Image (tube, rainbow, N blue to C red):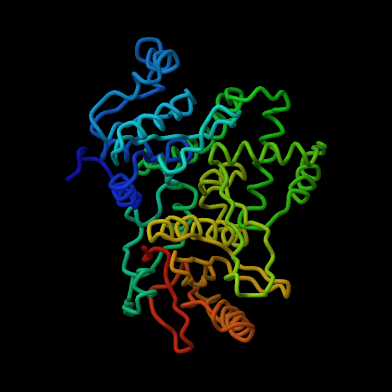
C-alpha cells in the first residue's frame, strides 16, 4: 500500500525492497529531480534530510559536527543527499557493521564526491542502485502490452497495440521523464529543462567538493551542447573536442574535456552505454567505445533548442532523439530485470543499437527505428549480424532479435523471427 496517494510507482521500487531484505544499506543514485527521495520515502520509516533549509540548514551542520546523530531513527532510515556531508558514508558503514542486520539505511545521492582517501568503499555493507528519470511505462505513456521478459521466456503473444501519433512521440522526447512536471504543458517542460541546465552550470558546478580551479561554466556548456549534437553516437573525446572548436571557435584541451566528462558522470548528467563483450570463451574482438547519452532527452532538446514541431520537421534529428528515448527506457527495463544495457559494434562495422543482457548471460539484440517503413531494413541488418555471430561461435548468439519502433500499431513476431515492438507498448 502506498504511503502517499499521489506517488507514481517506479520500477526501482521492487529492486530497493529486495536489497533491503539482505543488505545493511542501499544507496540510490541518480540525477537531481528524478524522484529518488520520493521513491525512497515510500519504503523508509524515518528520514534525515541533509539539505533541508530548516533552521538555517541545521541538519547539514549537525551531520558535519556529529554524523552519528543523523543515523538515528526507525529503520529503514533514509539519509537524503548524503554526499553533502561525505563523512556520513563511513558513519553508515560502521553502523551497519555494528548492528549486523539488513535494511538499516537508505541513502540518496545526486552526485558522487571525489574520493580523497577518507571514504571506505562500503563493499559488503552498502549496495548501490542507479535511478533514472521515468520511462514511458512508468509515466503511463506505454501500455505495457509487449514484455521483454515474455520474449526471453518464450511466452510472448502477438497483439494489436493501437495507432501512435508522431506528435505524441515528439512531445514525449521534449518533455522527458522528470516526475515533478509530467502533467505541465509543453512550454513549462521545455523551460524546466533549460532551468535544469542553468542551475547545474551556475549553482551545482561551483559547489562540487573538489578544489580544482579549471572549471569554466562556459566551456562546460559547450561540452554539453557537443554531447547533445552527438547524442546516441560513439563520439570519441577527440571528436567532442573538435566539435566544440568547430562550433564555437574556442580551443579546449583533451585533458579538460576528460575532466569535464568525469564531472558530468559524477553528477549523473550523462550515461555511457558500454560496448558489449562476449564470454571469455570467445576470441572475437569488438570495438569498445561507449555510446554517449545525456541523462534525459529533454536536456538534449533544451541544449539544441528543439521543440516538438522542430523535431517533426527534422526527421534525422527526430530519429537520433527517438533512439535516445528508447535506449533510456531499455536501460531502465534491463536494470529491473537484473540485467544491463550495451551496444554492439565489431571491426567489420556491423552494429546493433542496443543489447539487453541478463545476469544469466542471455541477451537480446535491438535495433531502434522511428518509422514503420524502416522495419524491414532494420530486421535485415539484425539477421545478417546474427548470422555472422553464429558462424564465429554459436554459443554467443542472441536469444532474440527485435526492432523497437515508434510508429508501429502492433507488437508481433515476423516470419523471419524478428520481433517488432512499439516503444509505447513496451515494458520489462
Left or right: 346 in relation to 176: right
Position in image of residue 416 (x %, y %):
48, 88
Please count the marks in the image: 0
Mark yes or no: residue 131 visible.
no
Taking the view exactly as shown, the residue that stands out farthest to the bottom is 415
| 303 relative position to 134: left or right | right
Q: Residue at x 34, y 52 (%)?
A: 11
**Residue found farthest to the top:** 56
Image quadrant assignment for residue 383: bottom right
Q: Is residue 283 above or below residue 8?
A: below
Task: State the image coordinates of residue 148 (x, y, percent, origin top left).
Answer: 39, 69
- Picture quadrant of residue 390: bottom right
Q: Which image quadrant for residue 335?
A: bottom left
Residue 254 versus residue 325 in the image, above or below: above
Residue 21 visible? The answer is: yes
Q: Position of residue 9 (x, y in %)?
A: 28, 48
Residue nearest the viewer, comparing 182 with 115: 115
| Residue name at image x 36 percent, y 66 percent | 425
- Front-most of residues 169 and 253: 253
Q: Nearer the viewer, residue 85 or 373?
A: 85
Amino acid at each position: 500500500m502506498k504511503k502517499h496517494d499521489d506517488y507514481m510507482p517506479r520500477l526501482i521500487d521492487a529492486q530497493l525492497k529486495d536489497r533491503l531484505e539482505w543488505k545493511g544499506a542501499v544507496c540510490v543514485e541518480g540525477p537531481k529531480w528524478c524522484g529518488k527521495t520520493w521513491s525512497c520515502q515510500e519504503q523508509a520509516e524515518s528520514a534525515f534530510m541533509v539539505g533541508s533549509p530548516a533552521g538555517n540548514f541545521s541538519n547539514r551542520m549537525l551531520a558535519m559536527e556529529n554524523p552519528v546523530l543523523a543515523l538515528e531513527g526507525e529503520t529503514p532510515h533514509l539519509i537524503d543527499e548524503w554526499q553533502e556531508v561525505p563523512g556520513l558514508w563511513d558513519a553508515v558503514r560502521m553502523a551497519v557493521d555494528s548492528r549486523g542486520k539488513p535494511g538499516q539505511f537508505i541513502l540518496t545521492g545526486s552526485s558522487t564526491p571525489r574520493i580523497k582517501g577518507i571514504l571506505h568503499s562500503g563493499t559488503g555493507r552498502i549496495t548501490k542502485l542507479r535511478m533514472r528519470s521515468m520511462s514511458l511505462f512508468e509515466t503511463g505513456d506505454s501500455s505495457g502490452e509487449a514484455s521483454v521478459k515474455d520474449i526471453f521466456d518464450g511466452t510472448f503473444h502477438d497483439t494489436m497495440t493501437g495507432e501512435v501519433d508522431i506528435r505524441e512521440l515528439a512531445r514525449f522526447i521534449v518533455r522527458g521523464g522528470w516526475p515533478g512536471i509530467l502533467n505541465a504543458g509543453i512550454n513549462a517542460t521545455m523551460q524546466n529543462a533549460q532551468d535544469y541546465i542553468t542551475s547545474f552550470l551556475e549553482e551545482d558546478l561551483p559547489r562540487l567538493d573538489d578544489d580544482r580551479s579549471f572549471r569554466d561554466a562556459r566551456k562546460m556548456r559547450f561540452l554539453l551542447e557537443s554531447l547533445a549534437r552527438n547524442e546516441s553516437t560513439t563520439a570519441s573525446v577527440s571528436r567532442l573536442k573538435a566539435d566544440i572548436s568547430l562550433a564555437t571557435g574556442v580551443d579546449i584541451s583533451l585533458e579538460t574535456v576528460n575532466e569535464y566528462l568525469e564531472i558530468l558522470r559524477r553528477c549523473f548528467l550523462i550515461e555511457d552505454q558500454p560496448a558489449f563483450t562476449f564470454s571469455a570463451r570467445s576470441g572475437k574482438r569488438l570495438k569498445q567505445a561507449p555510446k554517449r547519452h545525456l541523462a534525459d532527452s529533454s536536456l538534449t532538446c533544451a541544449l539544441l533548442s528543439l521543440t516538438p514541431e522542430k523535431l517533426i520537421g527534422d526527421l534525422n534529428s527526430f530519429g537520433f532523439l527517438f533512439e535516445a528515448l528508447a535506449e533510456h527506457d531499455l536501460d531502465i527495463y534491463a536494470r529491473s530485470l537484473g540485467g544491463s544495457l550495451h551496444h554492439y559494434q565489431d571491426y567489420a562495422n556491423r552494429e546493433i543499437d542496443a543489447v539487453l543482457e541478463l545476469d544469466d548471460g542471455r541477451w537480446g539484440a535491438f535495433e531502434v527505428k522511428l518509422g514503420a517503413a524502416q522495419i524491414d531494413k532494420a530486421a535485415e541488418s539484425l539477421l545478417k549480424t546474427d548470422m555472422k555471430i553464429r558462424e564465429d561461435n554459436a554459443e554467443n548468439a542472441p536469444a532474440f532479435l527485435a526492432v523497437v519502433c515508434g510508429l508501429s500499431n502492433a507488437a508481433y513476431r515476423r516470419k523471419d523471427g524478428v520481433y517488432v515492438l512499439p516503444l509505447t507498448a513496451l515494458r520489462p
